[in-house]
Image (cartoon, helix red, strand yellow):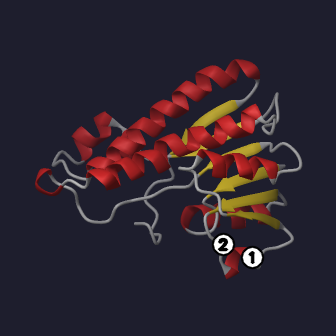
Amino acid sequence: ARVLVTGGNRGIGLALVKELVACGANVIVTCRKSNDEIDGMAPAVQVIEGVDVTDTESVKAMTRALDAPVDVLINNAGYFYEPVETIENMAFDEELKMIDICAVGPLRVASALYNAGLIAKPGGKIAMITSQGGSVSWRVVQNPTGHDFGHHMSKSAANMGGVLLAQELGPRGILVQMLHPGFNKTGMT
């Protein structure tokens, strides 16, 4: 299978890439900046560097670097603003950045691939790496103290985007699924 992983150069994305390579998948990694570890996986991994999921033209350029449709898209690129946000210290620009990367970014990538005919159909799959932190009911029950506005809003929007993609693409033979990997200790967390 041809699998494209956004943000596959570190963290959960890199772990997914390693597993996919071990399973024999043909893996394509997109990232803003590559690194020695991901570059060392060539030729098993094709790296498309300079892809910023917040930039529509950058994402369109990514499609031009592909020579055939992908069977699976894993929308993994993410961002987490580290300082705890409270009502006293809102970081509005960081909130917008998280929403753009975590919620709108996956839509940019899916739309660009679909419109370029680069998601296999029928039978293509889109996985959205998201978080239970986007669930209103989970947040109220598990962590009712507030804070981290941008993270939770971005994941909630990503979850809704995934649902809407599933509703549109399911009848066209493309499965969309939101995946919550649980807490993982990475450079982002």
Sequence-wise, which precedes: disc 2 or disc 1?
2
As helix, strand or loop, the secondary structure at mark 2 comes to: loop
- x 78%, y 36%: residue: 116
Residue with the mark numbered 1: 39
- x 53%, y 50%: residue: 54
Quarter where residue 167 is shown? top right
Image vertical order of residue 58 relative to residue 31, above or below: above
- Expressed as whole percent of the image width and height from the top left, the position of residue 39 reads 74, 76
Instruction: Name the amino acid type tagged 2.
Output: Ser
Q: Is residue 123 left or right of residue 87?
A: right
**Mark 2, other Cα within 10 Å: few <14 / some 14–19 / many ≥20:** some
Image vertical order of residue 148 relative to residue 33, above or below: above
Quarter where residue 137 is shown? top left
As helix, strand or loop, the secondary structure at mark 1 comes to: helix
Instruction: Name the amino acid type tagged 1.
Output: Asp
- x 69%, y 81%: residue: 36
Residue 34 - label = 2
Q: Between marks 2 and 1, how big is the CA–CA gap?
A: 7 Å
- x 80%, y 32%: residue: 123
Disc 2 to disc 1: CB gap under 8 Å:
yes
